[in-house]
Image: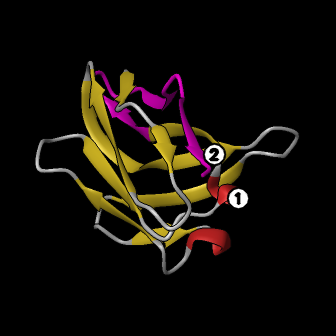
């Protein structure tokens, strides 16, 4: 199972950015899909995930500012980020966990995309 992330970018403080992630390969079902991030010198942290019934889960630092949703296409997820701050600067990684067509479980990661919030 492969995950492809949209390109991040440079955002001014207070600005917004949307990220997309699409899964491909022998996916039968996705149980949870979402985003994690890692800033320089810091531990990875949860940004947001969404489970199969559509219920979201957010990291404390992004609650009220970020929104995760299922994409229109199958096996995709979108992350809308608003009111961004320099503390949101990090490499954002897409993650998906579920089952492949042959019944095996998978836990896949994207390559990561850089998001920088700076004036």
Please identify the dominant SS of the magenta region. Answer: strand
Q: Earlier in the sequence, mark 1 or mark 2?
A: 2
The residue sitting at the right extreme is 41
* Residue 40 occupies quadrant: top right
**Which residue is labeled 1 in the image?**
87
How many numbered marks appear?
Answer: 2
What range of the chain is rendered magenta? 97-119
Residue 71 location in percent, x, y? 20, 50
> Where is residue 43 drawn, in percent x and y?
82, 46
Q: Secondary structure at mark 2?
A: strand
Asked whether residue 36 appears in the rendered view, the answer is: yes
Image quadrant containing the N terminus: top left
Please determine whether, in this image, residue 116 is positioned above or below residue 104: below
Indicate whether 47 appears above or below 35: below
| Among the 4 quarters of the image, the one containing residue 91 | top right
Q: Which of the pair 45/7 is nearer the observer?
A: 7
Q: Which mark is residue 40?
A: none
The label on residue 37 is 2
């Amino acid at each position: 199972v492969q995950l492809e992330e949209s390109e991040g970018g440079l955002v001014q403080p207070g600005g917004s950015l949307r990220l997309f992630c699409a899964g491909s390969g022998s996916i039968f079902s996705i149980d949870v899909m979402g985003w994690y991030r890692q800033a320089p010198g810091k531990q990875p942290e949860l940004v947001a995930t969404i489970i199969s019934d559509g219920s979201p889960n957010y990291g404390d630092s992004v609650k009220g500012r970020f929104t995760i949703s299922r994409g229109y296409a199958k096996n995709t997820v979108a992350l809308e980020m608003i009111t961004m701050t320099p503390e949101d600067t990090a490499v954002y990684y897409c993650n998906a966990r579920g089952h492949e067509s042959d019944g095996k479980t998978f836990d896949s990661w994207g390559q990561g995309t850089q998001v920088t919030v700076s004036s």
